[in-house]
Amino acid sequence: MIIGRDKLLENEIFPRLEKGQSFILIGQRGIGKSKILKWAYEHCPDEKKVLVNAGETLGDIIKAMCQVNGIVVSKKKIGELEKELIQGERMTVFLDDAHKLTPKQAQFFTNYNELYPVYLSGIEPFREEIKRLTWGKKKLVIHAVAKEYREELARHVISETGANCGLSTLINGGKGVPARTWAIGKGEFIRDDDERVEGEEINIAPILMIGVGGIMIMRYLAIGMEQKDLYILGGCFMGFAYFLRIMIMGMSKK
């Protein structure tokens, strides 16, 4: 059950599946990319399709693909199976956790994607060898579940887990991140670094700019009025604003 993603599934995902237009799902950890990719796999009209995870070894991935494509696996080397897949029948691949791809995995899927469709999900930024696999794919950014659907998500988690925590705890604590909401419902520990939710950050840059502008005006007035103390105070505020800017930039990179 995918809550709060109806428009994405109906307007973005399914039409591209019907047309064979591959895409890549992008978003922070726990936002629901894997579940959406699985939905895409289940609703893909292609006869031959496979869902794999980049966290598996290349050998296991190739064997799984061969089994779906009717290729005999036993007593064959991985290199032989790889060639048979490339030369074999069309098969659509859904690859989860693309950011985990090793260089060899990335090269294999890049070669495969030149002939057959590969749908992806992953967390940016990607390494250079993985970026080649993403070329030409529509990037679909998955944000937190919209606020109007968060109560429905919370109620679903409670019904499935029997959580004793209050509804508001799941709504406010989960912040629209499905994995986070489920973790709270199961009573799991939530790390502080999970607090930030992409798409809901508060941009204080305009406020900071207004503050700096006000300080500069104050210093000019201080010069005109020959108020040395006010001029020095303005300089102190300027220094503090510069220090605050450096701190904000540092935090945004984490």
Image (cartoon, rainbow, N blue to C red):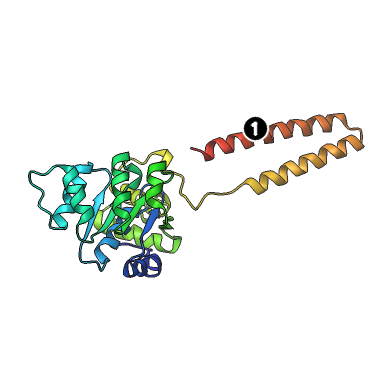
Give the total of numbered labels: 1
Residue 131 screen position, x and y as percent: 41, 47
The kind of secondary structure element at disc 1 is helix
Rendered position, 240 above or below 121 = above
Residue 217 screen position, x and y as percent: 82, 42
- Closer to the camera in the image, 233 or 88: 88
Looking at the image, the residue that sits furthest to the right is: 225
Q: Mark 1 points at which residue?
A: 243
Q: Residue at x 32, y 42 (%)?
A: 100
The amino acid beneath tag 1 is Phe
For mark 1, does the 10 Å Cα neighbourhood hold few (<14), some (14 to 19), or many (20 or more) residues? few
Rendered position, 87 above or below 7 = above
- Closer to the camera in the image, 3 or 60: 60
Residue 9 screen position, x and y as percent: 36, 66
Rendered position, 152 above or below 193 = below
- Closer to the camera in the image, 47 or 121: 47
Q: Which residue is drawn at 32% across and 54% down?
A: 113
Residue 50 placement, left or right of 19 = left
Q: Which residue is drawn at 46% across and 45% down?
A: 196
Residue 126 visible within the image: yes
Residue 200 screen position, x and y as percent: 50, 52
